[in-house]
Image (cartoon, helix red, strand yellow):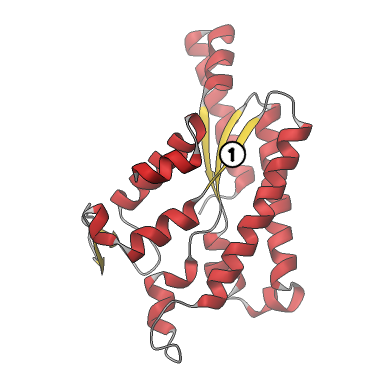
Amino acid sequence: MIPLWKELEFYKEYQARLRSHVGVERANEIISEALYLMSLGTNDFLENYYVFPTRRIHYTVSQYQDFLLSIAENFVRELYALGARKLSITGLVPVGCLPLERATNILGDHGCNEEYNNVALTFNAKLENVIARLNRELPQLKALSANAYSVVSDIIARPSAYGMCYLLLLSPSLVFLFLSAMHDTMMVTMIMVFCALCSFFLSSSYCMCLV
């Protein structure tokens, strides 16, 4: 997993190569007109906060949410300083419904872990506030929240409507929802990307009707 600061370094290297290839003016146009897709939170909670006891000693869930969002906000501000103007930001999906969480939810009869899902919902609500603040404070920035929680919830509830099965498959597939205990397949990713693009250029309510 690449930390955000390292991703920024890679992005700066890309910008330098782009400018040397197409020239400064054209490169700046590409950078400002590009749509940046940003996803955050899932690994931070499932592979960090809920795995390492020291995290839970030092942070409440709410404090950890705020900690992650402060890092994300700084990342967006740095992207903006580098020329980015259009962002679609994805928060948490219903992490309590991932195969890993359902498999370990013995007391809940292997249903979704609603505690984790509630954490996801409160995180996403806070993310909405961060995005609104960024749009107010950064001129010409257009940042939107991609509603991945609702999209993935609907896929899980109605997989056949998307031509998929709610099964775990340990090989790449466009038919099944999950590739591993925590990761969705390419089809789910494609749907989420489509929704991000659709929400950015059209409207969230219209795009949900298309899915």
Q: Please, is residue 30 above or below residue 98 in the view?
A: above
Q: What residue is rendered at 51% in x and 29% in y? A: 35
Amino acid found under the numbered disc labelled 1:
Leu
Q: In this view of the protein, which residue sits in the foreground, 122 or 66? A: 122
- Left or right: residue 39 versus residue 61 is left
Outermost residue to the right: 137
Number of labels in the image equals 1
Q: In this view of the protein, which residue sits in the foreground, 34 or 13? A: 34
Q: What residue is rendered at 69% in x and 77% in y? A: 56
Q: What residue is rendered at 64% in x and 63% in y? A: 122
Instruction: Give coordinates of residue 205: x percent, y percent.
Output: 47, 43
Instruction: Give coordinates of residue 43: x percent, y percent.
Output: 52, 62
Q: Please, is residue 74 above or below residue 102 in the view?
A: above
Q: Please, is residue 128 above or below residue 58 in the view?
A: above
Residue count near mark 1 (Cα–Cα under 10 Å), binned few <14, some 14–19, many ≥20: many
Outermost residue to the bottom: 107
The quarter of the displayed image where residue 165 is located: bottom left
Instruction: Give coordinates of residue 99: x percent, y percent.
Output: 37, 72
Instruction: Give coordinates of residue 190: x percent, y percent.
Output: 34, 44
Element type where label 1 sits in the image: strand
Q: In this view of the protein, which residue sits in the foreground, 27 or 6? A: 27
Mark 1 = which residue? Answer: 144
